[in-house]
Amino acid sequence: MSLPKDNKDSIPEPTKGLEGVVAADTNLSSVNGEKGILRYCGFNIDDLALDTTFEETICILYDYELPSEDRLKEMTKNIGEARVLPDEVVEVITKLVGKTSPMSTLRTVVSALGHYEKNVPLSELAPKALRLVGQIATAVAMIHRLREGLPIIKADPERGHAEDFLRMLHGNEPSKIQINALNLYLILLADHGFNASTFSARVTAGTLANLHSAITSAVGTLSGPLHGGANEKAMDMILEVGKPENASKYIENAFNNKQKIMGFGHRVYKVDDARRIHLKNMTELVCKENGNMEIYRTAEEIEKEVRKRKSIITNVDFYSAPLL
């Protein structure tokens, strides 16, 4: 018995990276890659970056409108209270730190937090998601301090989210510029359509799995070096270059060796990433305050050398690296 071997005509060509595939739609954010415009619920990211806090942006994403004074106070209070973790979860963090990577610890913590939540209808998921916003911030700060051999600093629910996270992370009062920088970063990365971790979370949620399972999937996806690890790789490159005067030779060699330069290129944006200029300006302010202007000037020189050689846009990862 013989069977036909050539079945190529019946197998469609795969779409690499799902480029051009419409998997779903969203009302939360819109990206115009041709003009370099990003909007949240109709609000231009340029306006939000200059004149709002992270809590206000969360209100917009939840309510599709700017918050009233009372609504903003309520949101700030709810996120603040959520930053206080259950003792059992703190114990999980303490046991895992040093035995796994930070992202693996965080992934496990998100899963563990699900044990403290009741299963609720889809219409009642918003408060659970909001609690995760506060809880994850505290978990990240704890993971960092324990890895550094430092004591845990408890959350202060009365403070703003960015301010309290920085205080828990570093153990001292953050400056106004530091608070503004983190607020800006959180605002600019609050939503961006269908990136890899969002896609992963929605696939999991699409099976009717619970919220914490979906976010656990997202954190696992975010841990990949081609997604959440991209800004770390960009920072490694900036530090390797070391000084502005080294940038030209480094980039020349990188192009000659067909080496991937992290922090450049984007599937959607054909002009500058809408978030780039805000991150660049804030990075300069932070570096001035910290006395690290050489890092900023090195990053700026790398960008110039890349653009001199190739028409390629700077993405959100590049300037977020020295900012953080």
Image: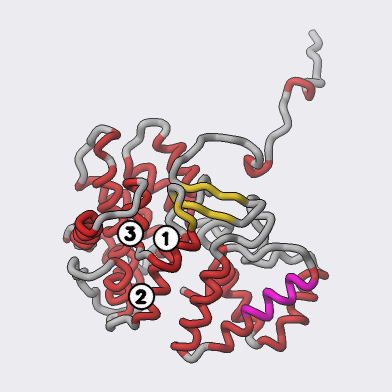
Q: Main secondary structure of the magenta part?
A: helix
For the question of whether residue 300 can be seen, the reply is yes
Label 2 Cα crowd, 10 Å radius (few <14 / some 14-19 / many 20+): many
Q: Which quadrant of the structure image shows residue 269?
A: bottom right
Q: The residue under label 1 is which amino acid type?
A: Met
Point out residue 78 in the picture as x, y percentages from the top left corner: 21, 56
Give whichever of 110, 306 is nearer the camera.
Answer: 306
In screen coordinates, is 291 left or right of 274? left
Q: Which residue is mark 3?
A: 56
Which residue is the extreme one toward the top?
1
Residue at the image position 54 percent from the left and 56 percent from the top = 227
Mark nearer the viewer, 2 or 3: 3
Which label sits on residue 76? Answer: none
In front here: 25 or 125? 25
Q: CA distance from mark 2 to mark 1?
A: 23 Å
Q: Is residue 221 left or right of residue 153?
A: right
Q: Is residue 43 covered in magenta?
A: no
Examine the image and state in which quarter residue 80 appears: bottom left
Q: Secondary structure at mark 1?
A: helix
Q: Position of residue 109 (x, y in %)?
A: 31, 55
In the image, 53 versus 86, the foreground residue is 53
**Magenta part of the chain:** 299-308
